[in-house]
Image (cartoon, rainbow, N blue to C red):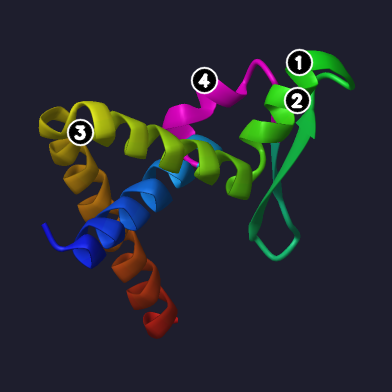
Amino acid sequence: MNEFFLFLLFALASYRLTRVIVFDKIAKFIRNPFIEEKEVVEEDGTVSYFTKLKYNSGILCWLGQLLSCYWCVGVWVATGFYTFYAFFPAYALPLIYIFAIAGAASIIETIILKLID
């Protein structure tokens, strides 16, 4: 497989899974033990989200900081995808394709929404 194409797949898959872990409601159960998330409706009707760590020190604080940091989670997700692919490419590649397709779709959707507004 072309190295650039494989890199692109990994990048898109890592992007999508990272967003799922850090922002999406479906993964809130992963963040809940470490992070308190609040939804605030502003006067103009826009919704803002605020996060606060539940712990001030120790491993639980570190995990909360990790799970609230898009850049940090991205490194670990990319590492996980690469390691999984290195040892089990036949199983990893379909998963990487699925997340890469979902990542590309979410980028396209974001662009379309920006153009419509």
**Which dot, 1 or 3, sits closer to the camera?**
3
Quick one: SS at disc 1?
helix
Residue of label 1: 59
- In this orientation, which residue lies closer to the viewer: 15 or 43? 15
CA separation in Å, label 1 and label 4: 18 Å
Asked if the residue at tag 4 contacts the one at tag 2, i.e. Cβ–Cβ closer than 8 Å, the answer is: no
CA separation in Å, label 2 and label 4: 17 Å
Question: Which of disc 3 and disc 1 is earlier in sequence?
Answer: 1
CA separation in Å, label 4 and label 3: 24 Å
Q: Amino acid at mark 2?
A: Trp
Vertical position of residue 63 compared to residue 33: above or below: below
**Residue at the spot x=52%, y=27% of the render?**
28
Question: Which of disc 4 and disc 1 is earlier in sequence?
Answer: 4
The answer to which image quadrant residue 109 occupies is bottom left
Q: Amino acid at mark 1?
A: Ile
Asked if the residue at tag 4 contacts the one at tag 1, i.e. Cβ–Cβ closer than 8 Å, the answer is: no
Q: Is residue 117 left or right of residue 70?
A: left
Asked if the residue at tag 2 contacts the one at tag 1, i.e. Cβ–Cβ closer than 8 Å, the answer is: yes
**Residue at the spot x=73%, y=33% of the render?**
65
CA separation in Å, label 1 and label 2: 5 Å
Q: Amino acid at mark 3?
A: Ala
Vertical position of residue 112 compared to residue 103: above or below: below
Instruction: Give the extent of the magenta segment.
Output: 24-37
Residue of label 4: 29
